[in-house]
Each structure stands twice: as C-alpha cells, then as structure tokens.
Amino acid sequence: MTSHVKPPTSVDVARAAGVSQATVSYVLNDSPGARVGDETRERVKEAAARLGYVPHASARALRTGHSGLVLLPLSLARTGRLAQDLLDEMEDELRERGYTLIQYGERRLKGAAAARSWAELRPVAVLVEVGRLSKAAVDLLKASGVKAVIGFGAERPSPLVPVSLYDQEAIGACAAEHLVSRGRTRLAAVVPREQGIDKMGAGRWRGVCRVAPGAERIELAFSEDEAARFAARSDLPDGVFAYNDEYAMLVVGALRDAGVRVPEDVAVVGADDLVIAGLMRPRLTSVHVDSTTTPGELITMIDEIIRGEREAGPRTVLSRYEPRLVVRETT
C-alpha cells in the first residue's frame, strides 16, 4: 500500500514558529509595510525550511493577480555562449522582480497551435521568436490572460507585438564593409546548414551582398570534412564572412591545414566576438553586437508592460542590437 505524505501548509509553519498564519504570509511573501521583527522573521524562515514548506503557485497567483511565470519557448537553433549569457542575466533580473523564467521545450510549434500549448501554463508574459507568432496566436495569448507578448529575433518592427530588433543583414554588411576596406574583391559568406540558424545565416549573406553584390553563398555544415573540401578549392574567395566565431574557427583551421595563408590569401571575419576570437591563432576579427539597452533595462520595460505602466503596442521597439567590428589578425 502506497502512503501519501501531506505537504506542509502555512498553518503548519505558523504552529512550528509560534506565530499567526498572517505573520507567516507577511514574512514568506516579503509583504511591504509588514511590521515583523527580525527575530520573528528568522524563526518563520527556519520553520519553513525545516518543514520543507513551499508556497503554492495558485495561491500566489490569487494574491498577485498573475502567475509570475515568464515563458521562453526554446528555439530550433542551439543556444550558444552569447545567448546563454544573456538568458542568465535576464533570469537574474526577472527573479529580482518576483518573476520566474521558464524555458519551454516544444521547439517546432508555431501560430495558434503553439499559443494554445503556451497558454496552458498560464504565463504572465511570453518571450518568443517573432516568426513563430501569428495574429491568431497573439489574440489567443492575450485572451488567456498573458499580459505581455514580446518578440525577439526580428529584423524590423512587428505589426503584432513589441520587439527587440536583431538585424542579421546589418551584421553581414558590417563584415563586408571591413573586408572591402582591406582590398578584398571576391567575397563569400558562410550560411550554416544547421536548422534554426540557416535563416540567420541567409540574412547575414544578404547583408554581405548589399555591400558586395554577387557575393558567393557557401552552405556549410559544422564539419571538418566539409570545411576541408571548401579549403581545397582552387577558386577560393579572398574574403570570407564565416557567419559566427565558431564557424570562422572551423574555416580558418581548414584553410591553414590546406596551406592557405590567413589573412594574406584569404581574410576571415567572424561574429559575436566570443572569448575564442582572442584566444585562437591568428586572432579572429569579429563583429561585436551591442544592445541599446542592458538586460536589466529590458526586463524593467517588460515589467512595466505587465503592470500596465508602459504603453507598448505593435511596432514598438524595446531594444536594438547594433554591430561594430573588432579588428584582429585574420583581416
């Protein structure tokens, strides 16, 4: 016979700490203006920890008017170091404001079908790639009680939701302008074949073409064998924008293995300006992307939208990511 242990309640904590249930609520919810002495606070917290008491999410929602959950549906693209660092900062900022960031694992759903699955978790906000939204999806989320739907990965303002702009073409153009300034006339751009980042790569290639019309598109998997086949070509371009720093490291390694000099024969530019850009040899020239707002400022704006203190409708731009070049030894 299976025994079921009843989880402790706030009444149990109050009894163990020798205080009222209201005092337990004041202490564990950090209620502003509550006059509770330090000794009593410590006694309540100790009792809650000893009993393993965890406040119920439904009770919290009733008290605050929302769940406090900020939902981030996972992208098809793998999360790189740069994106993970940003997520870590956002998670810290959200926690300080009383929210919990949860990453949702369904990567392929989009539109209304995706919105229904997200809405089931009753988040107060959803942060999602703009390409996965439709008007029906946004309407469904708002009708289910979601107070803020924020888009990211957009290259231009959205007619559906406020967005954080990330212009892929501008990144490619920034790299190409530098290569041209170095006297390179036969440019190419790597477009990864990896699902999820292939579209971003195509956008960056289009940016290179804005500066150097007819720039070659090199579709490449993250594979030493494929990189070696590219490096063995007799008609190599003299300037390559390699999508990001990881692909640039792959390309530079393959070129040097093939006896091609970098940058004398082929100049290479990466993007993201990761730590590896300065550690590899030759050191990698890379496009660094700056945001017009810090993670803290962005979360403050989202918090204000949730609270109804900030107007943010379709076509509102919450932040922009702007490229600049960090020149090192590969160009």
Image (spheres, grey):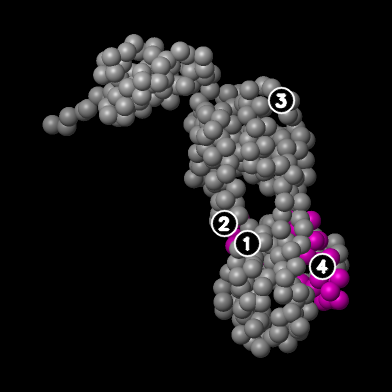
- Disc 3 or disc 1, which is closer to the eye? 1
Pointer 1 residue:
274
Q: Which residues are magenta?
A: 168-196
Measured in 3D between alpha carbons, the distance from the residue under mark 4 to the one under mark 2, in whole angstroms, is: 25 Å
- What crowding class fits label 1: few (fewer than 14 Cα within 10 Å), some (14-19), or many (20 or more)? some
User: Sequence order check: which comes first, mark 3 or mark 1?
Assistant: 1
Residue 310 picture location, percent across and down: 71, 25
Foreground residue, 86 or 15? Answer: 15
Compared across the picture, whether 48 is left or right of 201 comes to: left
Which mark is drawn over residue 81?
A: 2
Pointer 3 residue:
310
Residue 282 picture location, percent across and down: 66, 77
Per the image, label 2 sits on a secondary structure element best described as: helix
User: Sequence order check: which comes first, mark 3 or mark 4?
Assistant: 4
Which mark is drawn over residue 205?
A: none
| Whether residue 99 is situated above or below residue 223 in the rendered picture | above
Residue 184 picture location, percent across and down: 83, 76
Residue 142 picture location, percent across and down: 62, 26
Query: Does the magenta segment cover residue 173?
Result: yes
